[in-house]
Amino acid sequence: MKASILVLSALYCIGISVAFADSSEAPSAGIIVGERLVAAKAKLIKQGWKPTRLHTNDGYEYSGVEKELAAHKFFELDTCSFDSSRCILYYAKKGSCLRVDTIGEQFNDMSVTRWTRECPEAPQ
């Protein structure tokens, strides 16, 4: 009985360590999963994150949800998928990058699904 309790305790601790190890890759950006994109962007800007303007000179043509984001001046948009309306946006602060992933088919319904320290790929 004591051995099984120790094994369960050890597995619990390992699980907690793994969970926190994964989240340590993502900066504490002050935003939360499920938060509306508009609110998350406002928080990021207040904390000093600046939108990384993308597709200024590469001839990229927005379509679908991308057009709606561009109309609302979300030029930090990298791309959105067509099949699931998942979008990727980038921000920068003091030499650090922040990738924010969202989901939603309408601008007002878009919410944060995750974020991580990641810079946009250099244009080719």
Image (cartoon, helix red, strand yellow):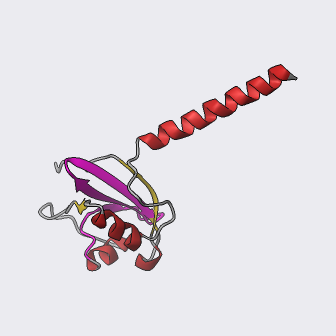
On whether residue 121 falls in the magenta region, the answer is: no
The one nearer the camera, 57 or 5, is 5
Q: Residue shown at 25%/60% (left/top)?
A: 48
40 relative to 60 in the view: left or right: right
**Magenta part mainly helix, strand or loop?**
strand
- Residue 2, picture quadrant: top right
Q: Note whether residue 121 is visible.
A: no
Q: Residue shown at 62%/30% (left/top)?
A: 14
Q: Residue furthest top?
A: 3
Quarter the N terminus occupies? top right
Q: Note whether residue 123 is visible.
A: yes
73 relative to 2 in the view: left or right: left
The percent coordinates of residue 6 (x first, y second) are 76, 24
The percent coordinates of residue 21 (x first, y second) are 49, 36
Please determine whether, in this image, residue 69 is positioned above or below residue 124. Answer: below
98 relative to 9 in the view: left or right: left
On whether residue 76 falls in the magenta region, the answer is: yes
Please determine whether, in this image, residue 111 is positioned above or below residue 13. Answer: below
Q: Residue furthest left?
A: 57
Q: Residue shown at 48%/63% (left/top)?
A: 84
Please determine whether, in this image, residue 25 is positioned above or below residue 11. Answer: below
The one nearer the camera, 20 or 82, is 20
Magenta-colored span: 73-102
The percent coordinates of residue 83 (x first, y second) are 46, 63
- Residue 29, picture quadrant: bottom left
